[in-house]
Image (cartoon, coloured by chain):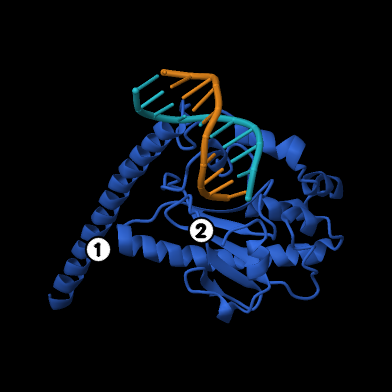
Chain colours: A blue, B orange, C cyan
Amino acid sequence: MSNLTILRTYAQTNPAKLPPSVLFSHSSTSLTIYDAFAKGIFHFLILPRVQAPFAVSELSSLRTLLLSGDKARAKQLITALNEDAKTLRKEIEEEMLDRYGFTWGIWTGFHGAPSMEHLHLHVLSDDLCTERMKNKKHYNSFHPKLGFFLDIDEVLSWFDAEDSYFSSMAKLDPKKHYEPMLKEDLSCWRCNTSMKNIPTLKAHLQEEFDSLAKREKAKMERRRKLEEKTAARRETDATE
DNA sequence: GTTCTAGAAC
DNA sequence: GTTCTAGAAC
């Protein structure tokens, strides 16, 4: 099953009835689900559950939430999603250490022009070269320098800015402002090198990830050895 | 969002 | 000839 309103269906379903292949965890206010087409090795979506005072229509997207009228209420909801994301990132990092022996970047944000109904916060690792990363639109929608991917901290900062700034950002005009960003030329988000097509980009991202892995694992190893030495020294000091 | 596929790019 | 993209259909 997959259509443009599937997330809305999940958000209105009793979490106990969602299959474990879909649901990762839930709280009283949100659901964390596995992204069905993960663009990073780790890729989750956090969805607000449909409950008062919000109507399902107000939770349709970031745009509808920001324009729903009550700024304080909207900020509160996004702050709650942010807290859930922090917890999730910790869990992802533990899993990274377990399975890969090091940790790497995790991004948390919204798409400027989402293509599925119901507000969803992406939490994904920054490797970005999985099997499901298939075209320019996929990649550019997460490229941190293009502007399509809106980091949650940036979105939260809009609430503390002047009203006129908040209003201009809250418009989130998909056709004029956001969708053209998806057609920008491909470039590596780490080193800015331009890439002629998706297979070339993915091979490059894989190399970047492999060299990062090597550096980070070496760092972990040095740290471990240092701790070993420190522990041994402590032991000697204690017996002297 | 994905899949399919015509035709552009190589 | 093969690889790859991008637009239509769903």
Q: Assign the N terminus of chain A to one quadrant of the image.
A: bottom right
Q: Mark 1 points at which residue?
A: A227
Q: Which residue lies furthest to the bottom in this view?
A: A16
Residue type, mark 2 in image: Ala
Q: Position of residue A37 (x, y in %)?
A: 50, 54
Under tag 1, what secondary structure? helix
How far from the left and from the top, in percent, is residue A213?
Answer: 32, 48
Q: Is residue A31 visible?
A: yes
State which tag comes first along the sequence, 2 or 1. 2
In the image, A167 versus A38, the foreground residue is A38
- Does residue A63 sit above or below A71 in this rendering? above
- Residue at horizontal 17 percent and vertical 73 percent from the top: A235
Q: Disc 1 residue type?
A: Glu
> Mark 2 against mark 1, which lies toward the viewer?
2
Query: What residue did someone put label 2 on?
Result: A36
How far apart, in angstroms, are the residues tagged by discs 2 and 1?
Answer: 40 Å
Q: Mark 2, residues whose alpha carbon is within 10 Å: few (<14), some, or many (≥20)?
A: few
Instruction: Give the left or right position of residue A87, taking residue A30 as reference.
Output: left
| Chain containing the residue with disc 1 | A
User: Which structural element holds mark 2?
Assistant: loop
Residue displayed at 37% across by 39% down: A208
The answer to which of A109 and A237 lies nearer the viewer is A109
Residue in the image at 68% along x and 65% along y: A8
